[in-house]
Image (tube, rainbow, N blue to C red):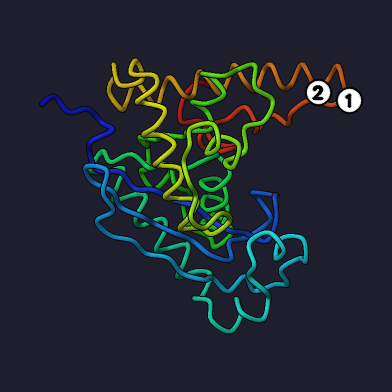
Amino acid sequence: MTTTWIDGEMLAFDLETTGIDKFEDVPVSFALVWFEDHQIIRSRAELVNPEREIPDGAAAVHGISTERAMAEGMAMSDAVDEVASALLDASRRGVPVVGFNLQYDLTMIDARLKAMGRPGLLAAGWKGPVLDPLVIERKLFSDRKRSRLSDVCERYGVINEAAHDASGDAIASVRVLEAQTVKFRRLLATDLVRMTEAQWEWHQGWAEGMHDYRLRQFGDGLLPDEFDWPIAGEKLFGV
């Protein structure tokens, strides 16, 4: 039986955080879930002490209170180191990191590393590969307006057993990716390096379209770092 990258090892990754600013907000939990041949072989999920108040709006989404995170969470520096170590190990071995809207999560870890006075992910040697079902979905269904994880799960009949939980969202991202490759087998016709490059190209196309739309509708476009992928403010591809 012929196998492709969808049958190989993957590292699913997700954060729950204090807010939507990927440079200034911080994690309050993380999940790392290792898959092989479509099965979970190992997982690691922890609360993180944010060392600041978690806004009510964010707590309402993921259900993690400031009191709980500060009492039970691991130190921020330890959490960031653990996540970065897992990402770097996967990259060295050519294992793809999978997640929904990974630009957000990867950028936050990159920003936290730099805030701690350490090299960012690219400077430390991380270079992918990456598989982001959001970027893929925007390419496959460019006419669809709603592309939240819950919308895409519904589109493919994927049940997220724990939405807005880092582990639940990480696992759901892999299940969505699997469903995408079943429906669109052409996604498997290239290797992981080229697939990562293709997603960068697809993100560029989406960002340019969204930038033009926002300029027309609201008079302000995307910030320059929003064109960068998979880490905002860093150039894995392009110049």
Q: Residue at x 42, y 27 (%)?
A: 180
**Residue position for label 1:** 218
Q: Which quarter of the figure has residue 197?
A: top left
**Residue position for label 2:** 214
Q: Callout 1 environment at 10 Å: few (<14), some (14 to 19), or many (20+)?
A: few
From this view, report whether residue 213 is shown above or below residue 177: above
- The answer to whether 6 appears left or right of 61 in the picture is left
State the image coordinates of residue 228 (x, y, percent, origin top left): 57, 30
From this view, report whether residue 228 is shown above or below residue 89: above
Query: Dividing the image into 4 quarters, which one contains the N terminus?
Result: top left
Q: Callout 2 environment at 10 Å: few (<14), some (14 to 19), or many (20+)?
A: some
User: Which of 231 and 28 lies nearest the eye of the viewer?
Assistant: 28
Q: Which residue is drawn at 13% across and 24% down?
A: 2
From this view, report whether residue 191 is shown above or below residue 93: above
Q: Which amino acid does label 1 sit on?
A: Phe
Q: Residue at x 64, y 74 (%)?
A: 51
State the image coordinates of residue 25 (x, y, percent, origin top left): 67, 57
Q: Residue at x 58, y 56 (%)?
A: 164
Whole-angstrom CA distance, mark 2 to mark 1, is 5 Å
From this view, report whether residue 189 is shown above or below residue 97: above
Q: Which amino acid does label 2 sit on?
A: Arg
User: Which of 168 and 218 lies nearest the eye of the viewer?
Assistant: 168
User: Which of 109 and 65 lies nearest the eye of the viewer?
Assistant: 65
Q: Please, which residue is most extreme toward the front here? A: 157
Which mark is drawn over residue 160? none
Number of numbered tags placed on the structure image: 2
SS of the residue at dot 2?
helix
State the image coordinates of residue 147 (x, y, percent, origin top left): 62, 32
Tell me, yes or no, whether the two marked residues, 2 and 1, touch with CB atoms within 8 Å.
Answer: yes
State the image coordinates of residue 199 (x, y, percent, origin top left): 46, 24
